[in-house]
Image: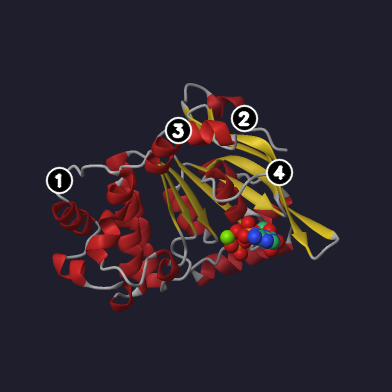
Amino acid sequence: MVEECQNDAENRETLVAVNHLTKSFSIGKRNVHKAVDDVSFRIYKGEVFGLVGESGSGKSTVANCVMNLCKPDSGEILYKEIDTCCSKEFRKNKKMLQCERQIIFQDSTSSLNPRMKVKDILTEPFRIQHITPKRGTLSAEAAFQLTYVGLDNSYLEKYPSELSGGQRQRVAIARAVAMEPELLVADEPIASLDVSIQAQIVNLFRHLQKEHGFSFLFIAHDLSMVRFLCDRVGVMHDGKLVEVGNVEDIFRHPKHPYTKALIESIPIPDPHMERQRAREKEHE
Ligand SMILES: Nc1ncnc2c1ncn2[C@@H]1O[C@H](COP(=O)(O)OP(=O)(O)OP(=O)(O)O)[C@@H](O)[C@H]1O
Ligand SMILES: [Mg+2]
């Protein structure tokens, strides 16, 4: 288990504390695979925490455990010091936990109900939680939230199938942000989008996070996006968190060989710089 430098933790208020989280899945009748193995980290209030690692390293399992979509085998996850893995504590705080924590998935095609119009998708959480929206009525709230993520009101009457991938993801973001979450979890929210759209969505996240100040767990493959967006980052490898800390410290001075390999695999757009890196590597 990695421990973070004490200086990073000074004077910061913790929103989520993941302590010794472990989760296994059975493969067939006899085999068990440890998807998450003794993972501990914190998400501080108002920060963007990135979680990176290769496919299958356990990132989504961590996110799903944080959001109570998956039950850990052991360990605890504290949200505002509430043990969310304890069924009794969860039930006692269910409404608050469901409103304050929101998640966005990679594939908005399956996370948005294809039979609902955008205006109903956007206001569904208010109806489920019996909350009066800030803008007074559900339709005013839907119109406001849609404009807020850069789509005009003509989209309110459309179905998800009538939207592009980027537009659908904007709707998913608007629905999550409408609840004014304190914790937003996004599990590879840009992975299935065109590269040009990816940058737009990451810029939207950055803008929304700065404006709302929510804590943000951002899961991604693309390390350059993580560097752009995140304050701290955790690196997962084979179910373990192998490194965690300030994003710039980790990019400049990666300690774990897997983190080094990940950073070295980021393509450099400038061929001259790319050749220089190759030469430096040869001399190592
Ligand atoms: N419901 C499940 N049943 C069985 N095995 C699972 C289940 N969910 C995840 N796993 C396994 O747990 C491991 C971690 O999966 P997880 O989805 O958390 O990885 P990931 O880092 O999110 O990968 P990706 O980048 O591809 O999304 C993988 O080996 C995966 O096959
Ligand atoms: Mg995943």
Say whether residue 241 is left or right of residue 267: right
The first of marks 1 and 4 along the sequence is 4
- Relative to 259, is 82 above or below? above
Residue at 37 percent across and 67 percent down: it is: 113
Q: Residue at x 51, y 48 (%)?
A: 50
Q: Is the shortest distance between ligand 1 and the CB of mark 3 under 8 Å? A: no
Label 1 belongs to which residue?
Answer: 135
Rendered residue at 31%/62% (across/down): 170
Task: Please report contact status of discs 2 and 3: CB closer than 8 Å, yes or no.
Answer: no
Question: Toward which corner of the image does residue 136 lie, by quadrant?
Answer: top left
Quarter that holds the C terminus? bottom right
196 up-or-down from 176: above or below: below
Q: Amino acid at mark 1?
A: Arg
What residue is disc 4 on? Answer: 73
Q: Nearer the viewer, mark 2 or mark 3?
A: 3
Residue designated by label 2: 5
List x then y, in percent, for residue 5: 62, 30
Q: In whole angstroms, how far apart are the C-alphas of marks 4 and 3?
A: 21 Å
Q: Amino acid at mark 4?
A: Asp
Pointer 4 or 2: first along the chain:
2
